[in-house]
Amino acid sequence: MKPNHDRSQGRPLVRVHGLTKSFGPTTALDRVDLTVSAGEVLAVVGHNGSGKSTLVKLLAGYHTPDSGAIETRTGDGAETELRFIHQDLGLVGSLSTVENLSLGAISGLGALGRIRGADERREADELVRRFGVDFEVDRPVDELSPAERTIVAIARALRGWDEEQDVVLVLDEPTASLHGAEVDRLMAVVRAVAERGAGILFISHRLDEVLGVADTVVALRNGGVVGDVACSETDYAGLVRMVAGEEVEELGTRTSEPGDVVLRVSDLEGDAIRGISLRVRAGEIVGVAGILGSGRDELCAAIFGGRTYRSGSIEISGRPLRAGDLRASIGRGAAYVPGDRHKYGAVMSMTASENLMSVRIPQTQKPWERVRAADEAREAQHWFATCGVVPDKPHMELSHFSGGNQQKVVLAKWLRTRPGLLLLEEPTQGVDIGAKSLIHRLVAATADQGTAVLVASSEAKELAQLCDRVLVLSEGELVDELSGTRLTETAILNASVPS
Ligand SMILES: Nc1ncnc2c1ncn2[C@@H]1O[C@H](COP(=O)(O)OP(=O)(O)OP(=O)(O)O)[C@@H](O)[C@H]1O
């Protein structure tokens, strides 16, 4: 295998040699070599738990390597600066782009410590325009699209960069919940930054995006480098094989007939939702598509009871549900995998097993009934195997599992309750291509056993593959319903854009 620095045209900015890191018996990173060069977008891909985040944390100095080195003084003595964009962008939502860019920047403070308004505004404007984008820098960043927020985070990371300076920008799964056109917008900015001479290290599970934006791909498996190729020398199938080690099984066509109505929503009005009515039958998988602000991210939570609503009604299996009544919703067989697993989906400081067992099974388990240790161990083993959670350590704290494996535990926790209604938000965020196919098959099998499934996703391709029909939301309203031959990725993307 030819290492990537032999192929790249640019000056090496960061060299990683033999980087190794273990956590107890787990070797998270195993003698990794790679180089990021000026003007290059280097993507790092790999299955869940392959070591990508560990690599980022070592580069950031959060962990110390057991052996190996990170060389940032690679050329004529100048030191390369590493700047990071983590998934949690670290922006203050209520503050504007100007204010976020000013935070922590001493140069932004006037003599009395006040932000010099006009200068800051001009600088923020110039900074975002430098990347070929144009949005109002005075609006609170909470009101920007996810791609725009990521661009603000990139602009902040590159503040003060004069392009003479050697910089590597590290982006950890920046597109995890972005919708089609948003991804293109962000990728254009990433390319623009590379063209200005920065090196980019880009972590992603979305292999089609990797092919679109990267020059070079390094694939990790079980901590070691198993692939190091130019994007021009590979294709999607090649990347899938590098990550999964084999071809990935596609979801077959589902043939089961839907049963009785399980979920009935009528004229629902609430935060970001305007007059939505829908039904989901037993055995059906119904998708919810739309861009940010369309109501896509709010609907499942409102139905489950995690958000209240102003008016309208929700019935599960023919029985009305009061707004915000989580207990009744779980008691009626609803399950909810939220988009933000850290905040609402799991308790990271508890073990995987404790998380798995944290919801009582309404049909069989009495409120006072405790699960015996032997039963808990057997169940944890069953769900780890069913959902492919690795490592096989149910008693390890959930925060020590890789992101994709945490997601599988959250899904398993709810599948265990044998729900009549399964509400999913971004069910495959952060999971690798093999695990994504497994999760799709698990959801399909759950529906085949009679569960009604409502799944909200920013990924049109996922909805087209998984769903029997897809509801498209725009500005809080239901604007289209796609099924049969009309249900394609392109149709979902087109229908999602507000007219
Ligand atoms: N603090 C820790 N304690 C114990 N094990 C850890 C710790 N951090 C990471 N690991 C283990 O190291 C391995 C690599 O994890 P890492 O988070 O780097 O994977 P990843 O490639 O980023 O995965 P994902 O795609 O799911 O985010 C995994 O087996 C993980 O469980």
Image (cartoon, grey):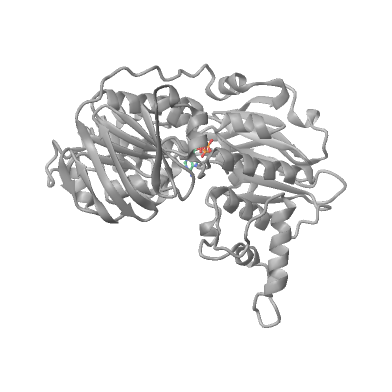
Specify the farthest residue to the bottom: 112
The location of residue 34, given as percent across then percent down, is 70, 34
Q: Which of 4 and 224 is in front in this view?
A: 4
Name the quadrant containing residue 51.
Answer: top right
Q: Which of 43 and 134 is in front in this view?
A: 134
The location of residue 36, given as percent across then percent down, is 73, 38
- Observer able to see residue 402: no
Q: In which quarter of the image is the N terminus?
A: top right
Residue in the picture at 43% in, 36% down: 405
Residue in the picture at 34% in, 32% down: 286
Does residue 34 appear left or right of residue 432 in this picture?
Answer: right
- Observer able to see residue 152: yes
Q: Which of 1 and 291 is in front in this view?
A: 291
Residue in the picture at 62% in, 44% down: 171
Name the quadrant containing residue 194.
Answer: top right
- Give above or below for 44 relative to 315: above
Does residue 144 appear left or right of residue 189 in this picture?
Answer: left
The location of residue 110, given as percent across then percent down, is 70, 78
Does residue 70 appear left or right of residue 253 in this picture?
Answer: right
- Give above or below for 149 relative to 414: below
